[in-house]
Image: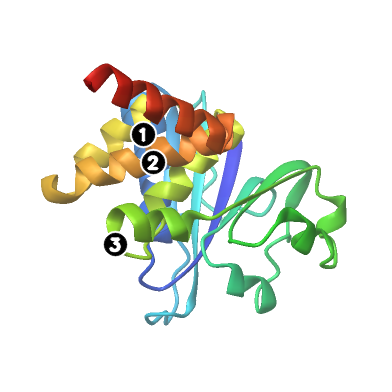
Amino acid sequence: MKEIRWHGRGGNGAFMAARLLGLAASVYGGRYAQAFPSFGPERRGAPVLGFTRIDDSIIVDHSQVADCDCVIVLDETLIDVVDVLKGLKSDGVLLVNSGKGEGEFRKLPGFADIKKLIVFDGTALALDILQSPIVNTIMLGATIAATDIVGLSDAENAIEELMPKHLAEKNKQVARMAYERVKYGKEYEKVKYEKVKGEQR
């Protein structure tokens, strides 16, 4: 079983990301999944949690995720107020949305021991393409690249199903861009773009 925890703030889509991943794995990936938020008196801007479980067998555990294979932080300011490392397995993946370099995070308590830390500027991509700072589909794409937990096409199908038509296409685009940047690096995206432009001439 793979267990994922999403850290966000009220209004920035952490639970939607958890749902999209669960839908991608179950409906389109042929596996079993759960996706649920932590319930409480959350308000816009307050810390919130989303959880996703994925397995090849029926999942009977309905408790909160304690030991995580992957932790995704949609807002880096949460690191100052929440223990995002709690329960992260020794071989787990930590993915942080930030414009800072990885070295800045390695200086923080506990971060030096993380074997797979990925820092990705999802907000810059969101502002550039979506004209909005909401990064849930972007961090979904980055998570898939970092973990191979589901197929990217399955995630794109989930986005099409759960999001209104006028939002789905651009969100599929940014999810794929995030996937490619994390998987292959920004230079790959630049070469791919130049190739497409050349074919259009």
The residue at 45%/59% (across/down) is 124
Q: Residue furthest front?
A: 201
- First along the sequence among labels 2 and 1: 1
Q: Amino acid at mark 1?
A: Ala
In the figure, 84 relative to 5: above or below? below
Q: Residue furthest left?
A: 165
Task: Give the colouring mode of the picture.
Answer: rainbow
Please identify the quarter of the rendering in which residue 98 is found. Answer: bottom right
N-terminal of the pair, mark 2 or mark 3, is 3
Residue 152 lies left or right of residue 53; in this view the side is left
**Hey, which quadrant is residue 148 in on the image?**
top right
Contact between marks 2 and 1 (CB within 8 A): the answer is yes
What's the amino acid at mark 2? Ala
Looking at the rendered structure, which numbered label has been put on residue 131?
Answer: 3
Give amino acid for label 3.
Answer: Gln
- Indicate the position of residue 3 as horizontal and vertical percent values: 59, 43
What distance separates the C-alpha of mark 2 from that of mark 1?
8 Å
Dot placed on the residue nearer the N-terminal end, 3 or 1: 3
Q: Locate residue 41, reporting x and y percent.
A: 42, 82
Residue under circle 2? 175
SS at mark 2 in the image: helix
Instruction: Label 3: state its secondary structure.
Output: loop
Secondary structure at badge 1 equals helix
Which of labels 2 and 1 is toward the front?
2
Residue drawn 12% across and 49% down?
Answer: 166
- Alpha carbons under labels 3 and 1: distance apart: 22 Å
- Quadrant of image for the N terminus: top right
- What residue does disc 1 label? 155
| In this view, 55 is above or below 10 | above
**Residue 14 percent across, percent down from the top left:** 43, 59
Callout 2 crowding tier (Cα within 10 Å): few <14, some 14–19, many ≥20: many
